[in-house]
Image: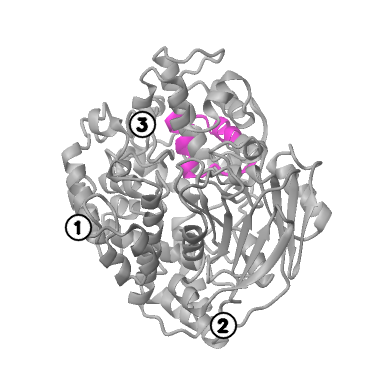
Amino acid sequence: MSGHWEKLLRINLTEGSSNTEELSKEFLRKFVGGAGFTTKLLYDEVDEDVDPLSKDNKLIMAPGLLVGPKVPTGSKTAFGFKSPLTGGYGKSIVGGKIGDELKKAGYDALIIEGEREEPSVLVIEDEEVKIDEADDIWGKDTHEAGDMIKERYGDVETGVIGPAGEKLSKISLIECNERQAGRGGIGAVMGSKKLKGVAIKGSKDYSIHDEEKLEELISKFRKETTEKGKTDMKYGSGEALHPLNVEIGAFPVKNWEAGYFKDAYEKLEDPEAGRIDIDPRKWTEEYRDGRRACPYCTKPCSQYFKAEDTPYGDIGIDGPEYETQYSLGGNCGVDDVEAVAKANEICDKLGLDTISAGVTVAWAMEAYEKGLLDTDLDLEFGNVEAMIEAVRRMGKKEGELGELLYDGVKEGAKKLGQGSEEFAIHMKGMEPPGYEARGMFGMGLAMGVAPRGGDHLTSCAYALDYGGSFWYFDDYERRDVITKGFPLKMMEDLMMIFDMTGICKFSRGIYLDKKQVDLVNAITGWDVTNGELLRAGERSHNVAKSYNVREGFQREDDFLPQRVYREEVPYGPNEGARIKRRNYEKALNRYYTARGWSLEGIPTKGKLEDLDLTDVAEEVGATKH
């Protein structure tokens, strides 16, 4: 079949076995690829009684449908798993080449189940699959491990965990050659299976339905993405920092105290015109040592940061991007780009999600300043040395502080107690990205309802809050939470399409409506319409939500941290703002209604059956709105 191999590779680590299974044509069309595949396979294979860190959890991997044939910005691969961090739906998306290699090896998806008794590496080279011992690689950081695997097996693409994943940190990641599948504790899933890394190499070309049409479309989109990329990605994702901070007031600082980095701007002679140190428009010229784009990328977000003889030692890291500038920067009260970059480097090497790490340290800083946390570090906001050391201890699970922090903010607050749960910033257990909800109400709702927890990429709703218009929506008012239900539903369905096809969401302004449809049809020979593709996105999102429902998640799990309801923003562009809980309740009702769910947030049987999800409807579907 054009566009797919119709094959799934299943690895059982316990048995040391591998076998190939057929994927039906119906499954392929209903779920397309990428996160569509991982979401449904996760629902079908990992039940509600499974411990996320047990051998019964599964690590599922699937490249997007458009990964492989050199479609501009088409490089994203999805991972699915039961999240150790939230106890529910787990999804993590990564760029780079690893998914491309899996597809060239002849597979549409990979399922890894079971566990090894000793540290191991999984090696896939076309039909040849083996599981080798890796005692000598266990304990190495992600960069060392990746290099050792490549030295051993040649020109392979790797996915590895660091010491944090080995120690089962619930905020650990998988590193794929300086690209990270970062969220939800995916590294701990690999670590629990004693799997240090995966190495993949493929040599096959798969069938394209209409190669001439595909080349025509690739040429067209290469031109469009290149032209736009020159203007809107010059400084990577960090371009958003200045307007989010100064104009909108949605750049979270000091554990979400506010959305404006007041301390950093008070150092400047002209705060309105100036750029603070962590703003890439200020540091790029001095520190950027080239860009390392994903395959077929014409809008590179990469900023390779290189510095020597800094107060924190030499630094070489792909980053820091916006979310890291927020989490380890402003949210910790740190405006020292070298310190943020060093902490970024430590996270990547130890295998920690930078968003979760920074939000967790910021919580610890507030606990310390309130006199609730006793530690040998002077853990005040803005103390760069303490921030860096806290990150290092967290990743190594070292000492009392490392033990407290290594599983993220929700678990840390449970351990510390003393009311620290009140300012633990998370949604469903996952630490949120850098969009202060009292400055971007729509993004607040989006982070609250996202199935995988505090997350911006499930919807990219910030595109509406940030610009006021996107896609079919104009005159969007970011300070009105009540009206966000329908736009959010549509954005979630649209962004799920990107996760199924593997197109990077930085290209979301280009690949709208019929454009991805044309690519899908040229590759597969299908005759899908824009409506059918959006329906596929809606279908997969409903499966993700249903997974959480089956796990026991309820309406109360779709709310935000108490701080945004109870506390007014003390300063900055949104001074005095807060989200009224009753307005959030109304927004939640409208969102559920737009989705066709009950007011308890459960997909109805009718909605699930309408989406051709009869099996899901029978298990979790609500009988009424």
Which residue is drawn at the image coordinates 61% and 26% (left, top)? 393
For mark 1, does the 10 Å Cα neighbourhood hold few (<14), some (14 to 19), or many (20 or more) residues?
some
Secondary structure category for the residue under label 2: loop
The alpha-carbon separation of the residues under discs 2 and 3 comes to 49 Å
| In the foreground, 303 or 163 | 163
- Between disc 2 and disc 3, the foreground one is 2
- Residue 137 % position (x, y): 77, 43
- Does label 1 or label 2 sit earlier along the sequence? 2
State which quadrant residue 623 falls in: bottom left
**Figure quadrant of the C terminus:** bottom left
Q: Is residue 320 magenta?
A: yes
Badge 3: few (under 14), some or many (20 or more) residues near its Cα, within 10 Å?
many
Q: Which mark is residue 2?
A: 2
Q: Which mark is residue 625?
A: 1
Query: What's the residue type where badge 1 is placed?
Result: His
Q: Which amino acid type is shown beneath numbered disc 3?
A: Trp
Residue 404: x %, y % from top left: 53, 24
For residue 256, which numbered disc appears in the image?
3
Which badge, 2 or 3, is on the more N-terminal residue? 2
Provide the secondary structure element on which disc 1 rests.
loop
Residue at x 41%, y 68% (from the top left corner): 510
* Magenta extent: 316-343
From this view, report whether residue 489 is shown above or below residue 220.
Answer: above
What's the mark number on residue 136?
none
